[in-house]
Image (cartoon, rainbow, N blue to C red):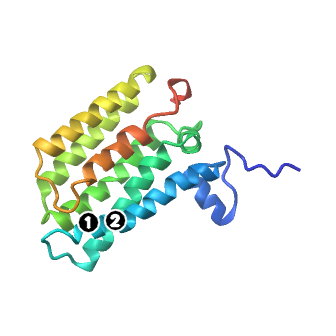
Amino acid sequence: MNNQPSLTQPRGGWAGGLDRLAGPGATLAELGLQFIPAVAALAIAPAYALTLPVVWTGLQLCLIGLLALDLVGGVLTNATVSAKRWYHRPGQGWRQHLGFVALHVIHLGLVAGLFRGGDGWFFSAVSAYLLMAASVIVFAPADLQRPIALGLYGLGLLGDRYWLTPTLGLEWFLPFFFLKLLVSHLLPESSADQQD
């Protein structure tokens, strides 16, 4: 009887939920790299926000922590071999990848609504750039996806710094947001792993 976890199929129960997040067969080292910094970010991001001359609501502080947890954890999780194998397995094509990215527009709506006074321009501009950049990466030739993703990530950073007004207390948000989605999630482990 083989007690080794499957590298392609999630286990049952709560362990299966972890497999669907981190990828089946994630090692203890991978799990530590994913969760320890993410949990630290959950505490550090609201602590940083409290150093600023802003009166935060409890909801805002909780959301700052949850966004930091999700984005730091997402950058690291999506960069692991186990997660790459899971999120780029057969059957996970452009629809699934763009759907995953599009779901994150919710993050932009929360930031625009709760931290930027309902800033529709921020929401629209960043959402449009995210979806355009993700589409370009997904439909690019496999051997060009990595440099294209990094270039579009760089443009996103420039836009965040020189075109948009930073979100006070969440100056880190867009750099981690774009890194998680455009670089960590969308890129397969190698161009040979690319699925249609």
**In this view of the protein, can residue 159 be seen by the observer?**
yes
Q: Quadrant of residue 118?
A: bottom left
Asked if labels 2 and 1 touch by Cβ distance under 8 angstroms, the answer is yes
Residue at (12, 59) in percent of width and height: 119
Residue assigned mark 2: 44
Instruction: Kindly identify the amino acid type of the residue bearing the numbered disc 2.
Output: Ile
Instruction: Kindly identify the amino acid type of the residue bearing the numbered disc 1.
Output: Tyr
Label 1: few (<14), some (14–19) or many (≥20) C-alpha neighbours in 10 Å? few
Residue 113: x, y in percent?
19, 65
Label 2: few (<14), some (14–19) or many (≥20) C-alpha neighbours in 10 Å? some
Q: Looking at the image, which residue sits at the far bottom? A: 58
Secondary element at tag 2: helix
Q: Quadrant of residue 161?
A: top left
Residue at (50, 53) in percent of width and height: 34
Q: How many circles with numbers are drawn on the protein? A: 2
Residue assigned mark 1: 48
Residue 152 horizontal side relative to residue 35, left or right: left
Secondary element at tag 1: helix
Residue 32 horizontal side relative to residue 154, left or right: right
Q: Looking at the image, which residue sits at the far front? A: 51
**In this view of the protein, can residue 21 be seen by the observer?**
no
Residue at (23, 39) in percent of width and height: 156
Residue 77 horizontal side relative to residue 168, left or right: right
Residue at (33, 34) in percent of width and height: 135
Residue 124: x, y in percent?
18, 50
Disc 1 to disc 2, C-alpha distance: 6 Å
Residue 88: x, y in percent?
54, 38
The label shown at residue 10 is none
Residue 140: x, y in percent?
38, 25
